[in-house]
Structures are given as C-alpha cells and as structure tokens.
Image: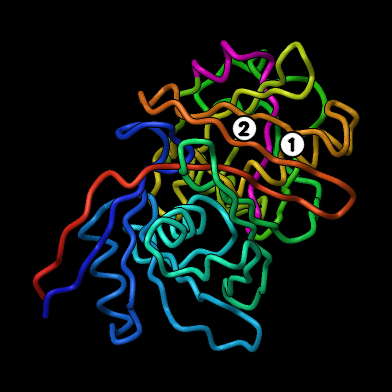
Amino acid sequence: MDLPFLWVDVFADEPLTGNPLALVPDADALTEAQLRAIAREFNQSETTFLCRPTAAGADVRLRSFTPAGVEVGGAGHNAMGAWIWLAGSGRLDPARDRFVQQLGGDLLPVTVSRLADGRPVVTMEQSAPVFSPADVGCERLARALGLDPEGLAPSPRPEVGSTGAAHLLVRASGSAAVDAAAPDAAALKALLAEAGGEGCYLYAVGSDGEDADARFFNPTVGIAEDPATGTAAGPLAALLVRDGSAPAGDPVRIRQGRALGRPSLLTVTVDGERVALTGSGVLSASGALHL
C-alpha cells in the first residue's frame, strides 16, 4: 500500500527551522510493528500517527514514537505539528476553534487560531505540573553534561518536572554554559534513570526574567539533542513561575535549537495548574511510503 506522510517544521516561521515532525495521517490500519518501523525509517526525534479516538469527547487520538521505537506521551511538538497540519488541511470544522486531543490516557484541550497571513496558531493545554526532588550529585551531573561544576547554578537544585512527561530540569550558570554542554550519553542516561526523568532540560534564565535559553538531551529514548521540546518547556515555565522568576499569566518565551542550527521559540503560559503551550509552524514536505 501507499501510505501518505507529511513533514511539519514546528515552532518555526519558515521551512528548515524549528523542530521537524514526521506525521502519518489515517494510521489506524498499521500494526504496532509498522508504527515502530516507520518511526525508525524517518529517524526524527518523534513520528506522530493520527488515529481515530477511543475516548468519548476526543476529536483526534495521537500516538508518537522515537527512532528507538519508544512510544512517548505529553503534548509537545509531536502533537503541535499534528494540529498545525490538521488546521491547514481542511479536516477541522471551520465553525469551531476548540478541540480535544487524546494522548495516551489524557484528554487535553486544543485551541486553533490564525495569524494575519492565515497560518494556524495552536495552543495546547498540558497536564497540571508535578515536581519532585532529584537526588543527583551536582558534580556528577556536571560531568555527565560535559561541564565544569561551576557551569551549573548553585540554586535552584535540579528537579524532575512533568506536565505530561517527566524531565530533569537543570539550571546552568548562564547561556554560555548551556551552549558549552557536551553530554556523555551513557553517563547521562544512567543518571536520568536514577532521577526518574526521561530527558534533561539544561536552561539559563535571561536578564528579563521570563525568557530562557535551553537545550534538551534525551539519551533515554535515543535522542542526542532535540531542537524544540514542548514537554520540557511546559514544566520549565511552571517552575519559573513557581519560583518567582516569571510572572503568572504572562507568556514565558524559551529559546532552543540554536546549537543544532534550527532556532526555535516556544511560548508557555502558566496560571495556577493550567499550563498552555503555544506555537505555529509550516508544512515543509509531503510524500508517500510504499509498503
């Protein structure tokens, strides 16, 4: 069979920037083995499959896999890219701007609006933020990230945060330290297993308080570095608001992807337990798999 696929650059204003997502619509007939094999074929940080919902009240069900065949949850670029395409494909009811997506066992609201040029802007609510202490030695963590101990900020201490996927949030001493990180994948993977985090979000807060520079490393699921990570930006923004580094209710802007030559801007709004990720993107390619 011929299986259509799309390529969406997420958190991007033009093609070949942001975080690329391989997207396969109408994927209900595919087997689990095929889902994993297709994700390996595309070899992107995540490949998302559009499926019919199985939960009442959901409009779309999404399943996302890494190249290693690991199914991942959370409303990040994996879901954002799917809704960007849906909004531009004519598959959404034009009389509506609010929808519900099914991600694993979660049903999460989605809002779709338009820029002046007609491009869709998607706002996705994530799960309520949850934090837990990470019992990791800072010197060991610095070594795993390829930094001197002075490259990590003395406070706050690293925490595991989740708004749908749990990641280790590590504050660097500044943007220069974020740029200088060169992780040891094996050491970082072992440390993440102990901490209970899927990936590591290394960040530095900008001088205006609400902006941050970040890089995301996830050897746990075979991702060396990701250019834009919505499931990590959500808990980071919630942490910054919780600690008073960013005001509640205002957009928190997180820059990511510079080290990979794919600059990305993620915007997160946190108000109490409501965490909402906003972004846009562009359809950069389409084709068919011949299976």
Residue visible at 56% across and 20% down in the picture: 178
Residue visible at 66% across and 83% down in the picture: 57
Say which amino acid is labelled 1: Pro
Image quarter hosting the C terminus? bottom left
In x, y percent, where is residue 20? Answer: 35, 44
Observer-side mark, 2 or 1, equals 1
Question: Residue 196 falls in which quadrant of the image?
Answer: bottom right
Image colouring? rainbow
Question: Is 37 on the left or on the right of 264, as rendered?
Answer: left
Mark 2 residue crowding within 10 angstroms, few (<14) / some (14–19) / many (20+): many
| Residue carrying label 2 | 141
Mark 1 residue crowding within 10 angstroms, few (<14) / some (14–19) / many (20+): many
Say which amino acid is labelled 2: Leu
Residue 170 on the magenta segment: yes
The disc label shown at residue 139, or none: none
Residue visible at 46% across and 30% down in the picture: 183
- Assign a secondary structure to mark 2: helix
Residue 166 on the magenta segment: yes
| Residue carrying label 1 | 158
- Assign a secondary structure to mark 1: loop
Q: Which residues are magenta?
A: 165-180
Check contact, mark 2 vs mark 1: CB within 8 A.
yes
Above or below, 74 relative to 232 = below
Above or below, 278 relative to 109 = above
